[in-house]
Image (tube, rainbow, N blue to C red):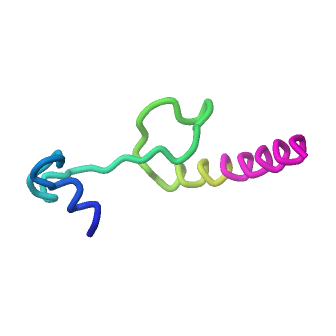
C-alpha cells in the first residue's frame, strides 16, 4: 500500500511499522452544532452525517447557482 510506504519511509516516515497505528480519524464534513468534538462513529452518528450531507449538497447547489 502506498500509504504504508509513506508512513514508514526511513527518511520521512513517522512510524516504523503500520502495526503501531491503533486508531485512524477523519474529518467527514463540518459538523455544525452536531459534532464539535471527537466522536466515536455509531449508527446514530452515521445517520446524522447523512442528514448533514443532504444539507451540504443543497448548500453547494445554492452557491453554484448564485455564482452563475
4 inside magenta stretch: no
Residue 53 is situated, as x and y percent measured from the top left of the image, at 66, 51
**Of residues 68 and 65, which is closer to you in this image?**
68
Left or right position of 65 against 26: right
Q: Main secondary structure of the magenta part?
A: helix
Which quarter of the rendering shows the N terminus? bottom left
**Of residues 63 and 55, which is closer to you in this image?**
63
Residue at image point 76% right, 47% down: 60
Residue 42 is situated, as x and y percent measured from the top left of the image, at 46, 52
Q: Which residues are magenta?
A: 52-68
Residue at image point 42% right, 47% down: 26
Left or right position of 25 against 53: left
Residue 20 is situated, as x and y percent measured from the top left of the image, at 13, 52
Residue 68 is situated, as x and y percent measured from the top left of the image, at 91, 46
Q: Residue furthest bottom?
A: 1
58 inside magenta stretch: yes
What number of labels is visible? 0
**On screen, residue 60 above or below 36:** below
Residue at image point 59% right, 49% down: 49
**Of residues 45 and 21, which is closer to you in this image?**
21
Residue at image point 57% right, 44% down: 29
**Of residues 25 and 12, which is closer to you in this image?**
12
Amino acid at each position: 500500500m502506498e500509504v504504508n510506504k509513506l508512513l514508514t519511509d526511513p527518511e520521512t516516515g513517522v512510524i516504523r511499522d503500520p502495526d503501531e497505528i491503533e486508531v485512524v480519524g477523519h474529518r467527514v464534513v463540518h459538523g455544525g452544532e452536531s459534532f464539535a468534538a471527537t466522536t466515536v462513529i455509531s449508527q446514530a452518528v452515521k445517520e446524522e452525517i447523512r442528514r448533514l450531507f443532504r444539507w451540504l449538497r443543497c448548500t453547494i447547489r445554492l452557491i453554484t447557482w448564485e455564482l452563475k
